[in-house]
Every structure is written in structure tokens, then in C-alpha cells.
Amino acid sequence: MTDALPTVLLVDDEEHSLAAMRMALEDDFECLTATNAADAVRMMEEQFVQVIFCDQRMPGRTGVEFLTEVRDRWPETVRIIVTGYTETNDMISAINEAGIYQFLTKPWHPDQLVMTAKNATDLFRLNREHERMSLEMRYLSRRVESKLEDQRKALREGLGFEKVLRAPNSPMNAVIAQARQFASFHVTVLITGEQGTGKTALARAMHYSSLRSDRPFHEINCVGVDDDILEMELFGVRRGAVPGLQSNKPGLLQKADRGTLFINGIADLSPRMQLALLRAATEGAFRPVGGHEMMRSDVRIIAGSSRDLRADVEAGRFRSDLYYALAKATLAVPPLRARKGDLPVLAQNLLFDAAAAHGKPVHGLSEDAVRFLENHDWPGNLRELENEMVRMLVFSQDAILGPELISRQILQAAPGPDGADTSVDLVLTAEGTLKDRIELIEMRILRETLTRLKWNKSRAAAELGLSRVGLRAKIDRYGIVEPGKTEAMEEED
């Protein structure tokens, strides 16, 4: 006998929206549907509902009005509202009046919807557990009850791991599973990964999943920071040690006492700073700049590095004792090129974030645009992807962003299930005859130009200095087909 699926109520006056949400959720949840607030209230009276997804704009009662009643009558039910970016006043009203757990913006991605629903059912379970434990602890001492409440709070905030967006079969799942295990132990953790892979987000999620979640989380990046400045930032400064400083300035080690300090770019520390950090990492002891006495801090240190510190240790560039002090547990964050299955979710989310920040609503990326993005290796990882989404948003004219907006070097990637390296230098130095290598570059230029010009062959031929017949011959020679068309349809054109 299997456990019953959690029950989710979907409320939307548009039947196609209800069908789409149900299709995304029905494998993991028992889905109830209603097209208006009145029907939804009747279902709440008859069914044990854990989570509600409700559209904001409905005839009659709005989503905020309905969820306000739900908060009063069924406060345990987790309430999620589905809304657009232009409804700022409605969002504020929802926070104040209906106690909304989360906003889901349109258009949502199926993976995003499923992840939000799972987070909400986890929160429902935690709230129920909280009530049960409160009853059990009624007759225990206030000190023990306070400690358990802190633990329950830490569990709730541990949902921060779900803010690390990914697909269901993402390689990040194994990394996050390990991070959850490490989070509950007071051990130093070394997070490695290329620049822009999200090491800071992972460190922050570990903090909010630990028993230190109610204490501060601080971060600092050591890359390119002068030793004197870094020493003051980490250890603090005593009054009089620096001209113009009239009072003691606490450092991050002191500010993060009983909390977490994430030190990124650890591989760039000078030998002097490595030695200064060693005692803090092993004993929690440090001396402020200009101070004579040692201070102590109960801080958990998480370190980040974009280089392989073991190789630096072997080469004598990094202290082995500091490495082992920082690397009691290690996590390796994969680069974006190894997370191609995550790219649609990440790209859409970053696009919607950019749209919200710049006040330019969009409905998402076209399938052809996602296909081109998946062919790129993303050497800059999430930062490069974020920049590309902002660039596409700036130049967009339609609600759905097509591949013609993508940067040229990305459009020139050769198509295929495994993607391809877009570097012209690698093509020039690759194996093969001169003719083959020139044709490879020519094919990429043709595909990029046609895509950027929305397959207007007259404009493409003019830009490339070809006749339309000449362009047609090259298209046929390389087998270039417009996305969404077959070769037979191309021949009819």
C-alpha cells in the first residue's frame, strides 16, 4: 500500500490553464480544479487540501480575496498566487491581506511549477509537525522548547536549496543532496567550481539549512583584494590603527559570530593571509588590525575556489594545513555546459527576473531560441547566461523571444544533441583539409545570418554579397533548414 498523494487545489477561470497545471502536477499530486472562488470554497469544505494555486484575475472574487478567506478558515493550507508582472499593487495587497507563501509568475515553466508545489507541501508538513511538537513540548522546560523551535525554523529555511533552480534529473541534485547532509554538521566546507556556477547561492542555502540559520550569513570575495584591505575586512580594525578611524570596526569574523562566513576566491590568498586565516579556521581565533589581544568567534567557514586547490597544494602555492582545515567536506559544482538539461529552466527564470527588474513583461523563449542556447558551451556559466537574457530582453519586440535576438557567437554554434564549441580559433587549428575547415566556418556564418534576419533570404543574400540563387545553392549544399520546416517545405520556397 502506497502513501496517498498530497492534494493540491488549482483555481483558474481559464480551462486551458487548469489543464496545463494539472498535466504538470498530476504525476506527483492529487489535483482538484475549480474555475471560480465559490466552487473552490465548496471543495475546501469537502476535501483536505494542502496547497492552493490560485490565479489572481478571475471574474467575481479575485485570487487575493479568495485566499484571504482561506487564510482565515484554513490557515494551515499553503497559499500560492499565479499572477503577472504588471500587478504590483495586487502583489502588495496579497502579502498584507492573504498571507501568500509564494508568487508564481506567468508564464511558468512545468519544472518550476512542480518544484514550487513540492516546496509548499514540505512547508505544510513542517507546519503540521510544528503543531504536533508544540503539543508534545508543552510540559517541557522553556529552554528545550526554544531549542526545538529553532530547529524547526532551520528546517523551514532549508527550503532555500530549492532556490537553486534545476531540472528533475539535473546533475546538481547529487550536489545538493550532499550539501544538505553537510549543512547540519558544524564542519568547514570547500565548494569548488568555475566562476559563475553559483557557489555563493549554494553556501547561502547551506547556512539557512543549518542550526545557525537565525544568525548572520556574510560573504567576501578575495579575488583582486589587497592584503591590507582584506585583513581589515576579515579581522576588523582597532581605533587609531588607521588614520581617521574614531572607533573600533568589527570584521566579518566577528560579525558572523555563531553564523556563517563564506570566503570565495580562497585560492587567491597570499601566503601571509593564508597564515592569518589558518588560526581562525582551526581555532576560531584572530587578532584585529592594531589590536594586541586575540579574539574568538564561533563562526562556520565555507570556502569557495574556482581552481583545484589540491594542485595548488602540490605546487606549493597553497598551505596544506589550511587546505585540510577548510576541506573537511568538499562540494564540486558542475559548470553550465554539464547542465544542459537545466538550461531551459535557468534561462526562462533569468529572463523573467530581468523582465521584472526592467519593467518589460515577456512570455518566455521560443523553442528554437532554447535550442540555440543549449548548443553553446557557456564559459561564463550563469553570469554569461544572465547577461544574454538581459541583452535579448533589451532588443525584444515580441512577447516570445526568438533566436534572432541571440548573440552572434552563440548562433554560430553547430547544431546537434551534444552542442559544439563555437570558437573560430579551434576550427582554424582543428584537423581536416583547408576546404573542409573553410566550409565549416562558412556554414556557421550562413546559419547565424539567416537566423538573425529571421530567414529573410533576400536580406541575407544582400548582407553576404550573394545572389539569391547563390545563397539558395549554399543552403542546399550544407543542408541548412529553417527551424520548424522540413526540407520539402524549403524546396517549395
Image (tube, rainbow, N blue to C red):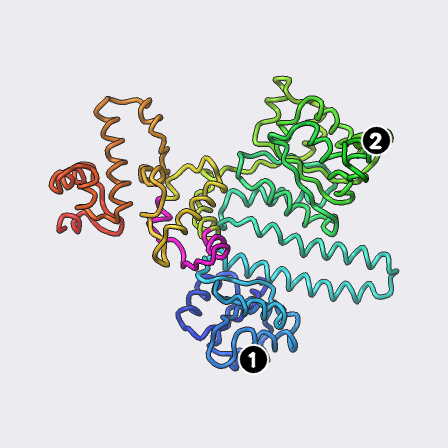
Looking at the rendered image, the disc whose residue lies closer to the viewer, 2 or 1, is 2
> How many labels, in total?
2
Outermost residue, left direction?
A: 469
Residue at 46% over, 38% down = 338
First in sequence: mark 2 vs mark 1 = 1
In which image quadrant can residue 425 be found?
A: top left
Q: Neighbour class for label 1 at 10 Å: few (<14), some, many (≥20)?
A: some
In which image quadrant can residue 399 be found?
A: bottom left
- Measuring from the top left, give residue 89's x and y in whole percent: 54, 69
Q: Which residues are magenta?
A: 351-372
- Measuring from the top left, give residue 129's x and y in whole percent: 71, 63
Q: Secondary structure at mark 1?
A: helix
Outermost residue, front direction?
A: 244
Q: Is residue 406 left or right of residue 180?
A: left
- Look at the image and tell me in which quarter the N terminus lies: bottom right
Q: Secondary structure at mark 2?
A: loop
Tell me the CA gap for discs 2 and 1.
Answer: 65 Å
Three-letter amino acid code of the residue under disc 1 = Val
Name the residue that disc number 2 marks: 291
Q: Is residue 313 left or right of residue 251?
A: left
In the image, residue 4 above or below residue 392: below
- On residue 59, the disc is none
In which image quadrant can residue 388 be found?
A: top left
Three-letter amino acid code of the residue under disc 2 = Gly
Q: Nearer the viewer, residue 58 or 481?
A: 58
- Measuring from the top left, give residue 280's x and y in whole percent: 77, 32
Q: Neighbour class for label 2 at 10 Å: few (<14), some, many (≥20)?
A: some
Name the residue that disc number 1 marks: 41
Q: Nearer the viewer, residue 285 or 178?
A: 285
Residue at 76% over, 32% down = 243
Could you tell me what secondary structure mostly forms the magenta stretch? helix
